[in-house]
Image (cartoon, helix red, strand yellow):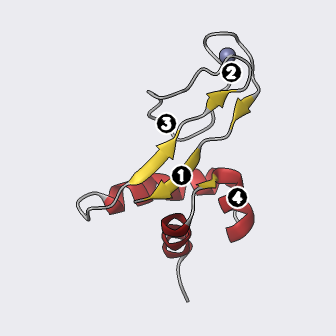
Amino acid sequence: MKTIRGQMIELLREEEMSVRDLSKTLHIMEKDVFDHLAHITRTLKGKGDRLIVSPYRCLSCGYEFKKRKKLTRPGRCPECRNSHLEQATYRIG
Ligand SMILES: [Zn+2]
């Protein structure tokens, strides 16, 4: 029996996934996905792998939340105040 985190690491090694994808695939809450991702980031350190994040992006003006340290979803775009954001995706590589 694999742990959720183990499964998550395997999935992310194979393909790029959003928090929503991970939540559906693993049958866990999105907020739990963020907790696991934060933990995975620490676990991977020093193993030669890292969590690669494609940042959230504003669907209105294209602004990218590149400097965002937190994994959770930003509220709205600082440039145009739009709240329609493209989901960040994650993979391990
Ligand atoms: Zn914007």
Q: Nearer the viewer, mark 3 or mark 1?
A: 1
Q: Nearer the viewer, residue 23 or 59?
A: 59
Q: Are marks 3 and 1 in contact (CB under 8 Å)?
A: no
Picture disc at residue 21: 4
Picture disc at residue 76: 2
Instruction: Give the SS element for disc 1.
Output: strand
Say whether residue 44 is left or right of residue 46. Answer: right
Residue 27 visible in the displayed image: no
Q: Quadrant of residue 55?
A: top right
Name the residue type under label 3: Lys
Picture disc at residue 90: 1
Q: Residue at point 26% right, 65% down?
A: 47
Q: Residue at point 49% right, 36% down?
A: 70
Position of residue 8 measured from the top left corner of the image (x, y, whole percent): 54, 68
Instruction: Give the SS element for disc 2.
Output: loop
Position of residue 74 measured from the top left corner of the image (x, y, whole percent): 62, 29
Q: Earlier in the sequence, mark 4 or mark 2?
A: 4
Q: Nearer the viewer, residue 4 or 13?
A: 13
